[in-house]
Image (tube, helix red, strand yellow):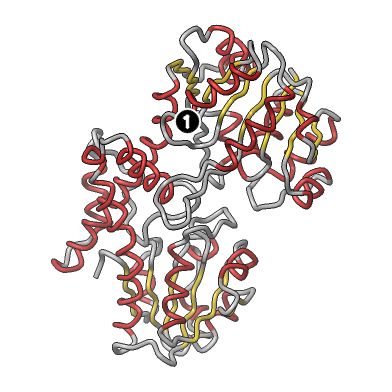
């Protein structure tokens, strides 16, 4: 089947390459010529495990191309809209500029029977509005909403072997459903669950899922606050309550909290849309979820000051990791980068290292100091902060690290290390929610 993918950022580039691996012919379209040039050369413009190999293989088939001209989408039967919906400046609401522009520019190139498929995370009500616009300008063309559920670091796996498909279709959605079934035939044949529903439910699925996950993370971080004042251990607490099948252990890892390009802006946009609909009380709890998440960053800064005698001014602080999670180069709303910047503002000499995120972090905070290795970051350090749980940091040997630092003090911002191992090596170990 011939497909187009509008928007070749994180979501679109992965989707385009994966669709080719499923046997389709795909053209990826984006307004950024540098991005398109890189992709056309088989180079991923961001770090995602497995994507470079998949992209090069897809290019080798001759069934994947990239363009900056939306007219090249003509002839495709299914058009995936994969553009970003960032948070509006000065507001919690989602900015739909890119979604609206993509659909508007695509409409002149649609034919009756074509299907536009939204994958971007949008406020409820967006799909119905866009469907009306498409129907008015290209009678016979259709719209479906097919939310993505990608995890950065596992995006290729999540696209090729998803845990579910959700189709939001119009009232008579049999034609749209049949086209999507053809696109995803391989995964459906393997038994992937499929839910066919209305536009509003499909739009709510993604933000509801992200809100639930954010709530679970903030819940255990709220418990971490209590653990710190009572002497309890939040990791053991999470292990104990996680054995309850109604709760589960996943996403009960206390630490710096969540960040990235999805959870923070999605829950804020959810609150903003609920407020517009007069249902703000229904999701009012998300304000506290967001506040708890922000407090963890402040608490880590306070902990760094505490272990340095009340002030970090003039202290040399090593920061291990600035991406919002491991296996990604994404520093959008990164708790780790935020903590590093706060410490620098307090007068600390912050030395930052990260396996993949340095270039992106430098673009956002060029005044901070970045180095390539753990040895450089920790040289003469008064405290070492593990802020992103990359495997190479979780596997650090405390005896080896002792050779570089000025003070054997480590703050585990992700509860990723074994306190007994580090203390046995003579280190002072502190973590969020643990003594």
Q: Position of residue 413 (x, y in %)?
A: 38, 66
Q: Residue at x 39, y 62 (%)?
A: 414
Q: Where is residue 302 in the image (x, y as percent from the top left)?
A: 30, 77
> Of residues 45 and 126, which is closer to you in this image?
126
92 lies left or right of 238? right
Which quadrant of the figure contains the N terminus? top right
Q: In this view, does 91 lie above or below 20?
A: below
Q: Is residue 22 above or below residue 320?
A: above
Number of residues whose C-alpha sits closer than 10 Å to that of mark 1, classed few (under 14), some (14–19) or many (20 or more):
some
Q: Where is residue 46 in the image (x, y as percent from the top left)?
A: 66, 52
Which quadrant of the figure contains the C terminus? bottom left
Q: Find disc 1 in the rendering and name its residue.
A: 126
Q: Which residue is drawn at 81% across and 34% down?
A: 65
263 lies left or right of 179? left
Q: Residue at x 34, y 87 (%)?
A: 308
Q: Is residue 162 above or below residue 231?
A: above
Q: Residue at x 64, y 15 (%)?
A: 141
Q: Position of residue 92 (x, y in %)?
A: 39, 50
124 lies left or right of 8? left
Q: What element carries label 1?
A: helix
């Amino acid at each position: 089947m011939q497909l187009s993918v509008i928007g070749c950022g994180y979501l679109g580039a992965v989707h385009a390459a994966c669709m080719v691996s499923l046997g389709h012919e795909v053209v990826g379209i984006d307004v950024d010529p540098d991005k398109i040039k890189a992709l056309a050369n088989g180079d991923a413009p961001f770090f995602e495990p497995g994507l470079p190999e998949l992209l090069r293989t897809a290019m080798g088939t001759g069934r994947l191309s990239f363009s900056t001209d939306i007219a090249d989408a003509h002839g495709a039967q299914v058009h995936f809209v994969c553009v970003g919906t960032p948070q509006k400046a000065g507001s919690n609401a989602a900015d739909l500029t890119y979604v609206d522009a993509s659909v508007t520019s695509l409409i002149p190139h649609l034919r009756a029977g074509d299907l536009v498929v939204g994958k971007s995370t949008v406020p409820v009500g967006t799909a119905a509005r866009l469907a009306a616009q498409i129907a008015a300008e290209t009678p016979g063309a259709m719209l479906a909403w097919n939310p993505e559920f990608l995890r950065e670091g596992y995006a290729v796996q999540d696209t090729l072997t998803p845990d579910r498909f959700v189709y939001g279709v119009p009232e008579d959605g049999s034609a749209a459903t049949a086209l999507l079934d053809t696109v995803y035939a391989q995964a459906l044949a393997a038994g992937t669950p499929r839910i066919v529903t209305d536009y509003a439910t499909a739009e709510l699925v993604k933000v509801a899922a992200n809100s639930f996950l954010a709530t679970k993370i903030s819940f255990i971080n709220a418990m971490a606050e209590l653990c710190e004042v009572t002497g309890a251990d939040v990791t053991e607490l999470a292990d104990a309550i996680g054995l309850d099948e109604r709760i589960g252990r996943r996403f009960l890892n206390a630490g710096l909290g969540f960040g990235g390009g999805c959870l923070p802006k999605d829950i804020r946009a959810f609150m903003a849309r609920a407020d517009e609909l007069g249902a703000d009380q229904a999701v009012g709890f998300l304000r506290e979820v967001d506040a708890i998440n922000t407090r963890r960053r402040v608490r880590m800064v306070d902990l760094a000051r505490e272990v340095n005698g009340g002030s970090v001014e003039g202290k040399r602080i090593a920061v291990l990791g600035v991406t919002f999670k491991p296996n990604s180069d994404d520093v959008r709303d990164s708790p780790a980068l935020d903590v590093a910047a706060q410490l620098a503002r307090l007068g600390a000499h912050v030395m930052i290292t990260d396996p993949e995120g340095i270039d992106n972090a430098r673009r956002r905070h060029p005044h901070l100091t970045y180095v390539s290795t753990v040895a450089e970051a920790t040289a003469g350090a008064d405290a070492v902060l593990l802020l992103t749980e990359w495997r190479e940091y979780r596997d650090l040997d405390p005896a080896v690290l002792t050779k570089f630092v000025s003070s054997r003090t480590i703050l585990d911002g992700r509860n990723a290390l074994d306190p007994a191992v580090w203390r046995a090596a003579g280190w002072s170990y502190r973590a969020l929610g643990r003594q």
